[in-house]
Amino acid sequence: MIELRNIHKAFGPKQVLCGVDLAIAKGESMVIIGGSGTGKSVLLKCILGLIHLDSGTILLDGEDVERAERDAFLARFGMLFQGGALFDSLPVWQNVAFRLLRGSLKRPRDEAREIAVEKLRRVGLKPDVADLYPAELSGGMQKRVGLARAIAAEPEIIFFDEPTTGLDPIMAGIINELIREIVTEMGATAMTITHDMTSVRAIADQVAMLHGGVIRWTGPVADMDDSGDPYLDQFIHGRAEGPIEAVR
């Protein structure tokens, strides 16, 4: 469903992506792992068109995304942002229904609220949360609201940017379970970027490791521990010694 061909991106003299090749099948949950600063978020933003490529091609269902009609293209995506990215000035239900209150996906206000309340219920939040503001919520609740917003418009493709960052282990486990359940229920194609190996094992069908600007290894999550790749092996076991040099 998503195909990346020889993707390059630099910022000034710093080359971040140096020929990334990757394919994500329809209905598959792909998790991209790698250390901080390896270009995971840049890759995701390139797919969404938030960052323009220096060279290479990104295909969605065989169509070059740079030639796609922008609104129709973005309507196919949902995204859970790393920091939640909720609008402080809007109540929770309007955050969840943000896309349903404007643009090509616009619904009547009452209908949008009804959908928002249902999506909040799906992520384990009660209807009375709908009229609260983000500042009144815990970090875990804010993350759930972000997840409800990501699925509100029933997208075909969902991106998860570090979905468990800043959460305690129990809440991280709950979010991982919700992501797995929702992606399966919706039949959505999912792409997650993370360095949390617990998340990887909980939500991945396929894993790709980004290092040195290229995909070092990709394969089923079940094959990850026996990959034979020294970079992947060092990363997933958190070893200080190995081919990946720690930034001190």
Image (tube, rainbow, N blue to C red):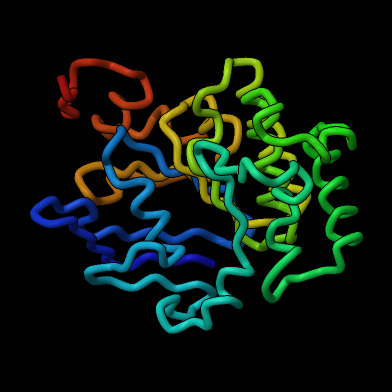
Name the residue: 50% across, 72% down.
60
Q: Is residue 84 left or right of residue 129?
A: left
Which is nearer the eye, 140 or 248?
Answer: 140
Can you give x and y, in whole percent of width and height, for residue 244 in the image? 19, 29
Which is nearer the eye, 9 or 225?
Answer: 9
Can you give x and y, in whole percent of width and height, for residue 179 in the image? 67, 39
Total residue callouts: 0
Can you give x and y, in whole percent of width and height, for residue 236 in the image? 37, 25
The quadrant in which residue 212 appears is top left
Can you give x and y, in whole percent of width and height, for residue 178 in the image? 71, 35
Query: Does residue 1 sit above or below 95 in this rendering?
Result: below
Query: Does residue 136 sit above or below 183 in this rendering?
Result: above
Name the residue: 40% across, 78% down.
66
Query: Does residue 58 sit above or below 205 in this rendering?
Result: below
**Residue 220 in view in this figure:** no
- Of the 4 image quadrants, the one containing the C terminus is top left
Which is nearer the eye, 96 or 184?
Answer: 96
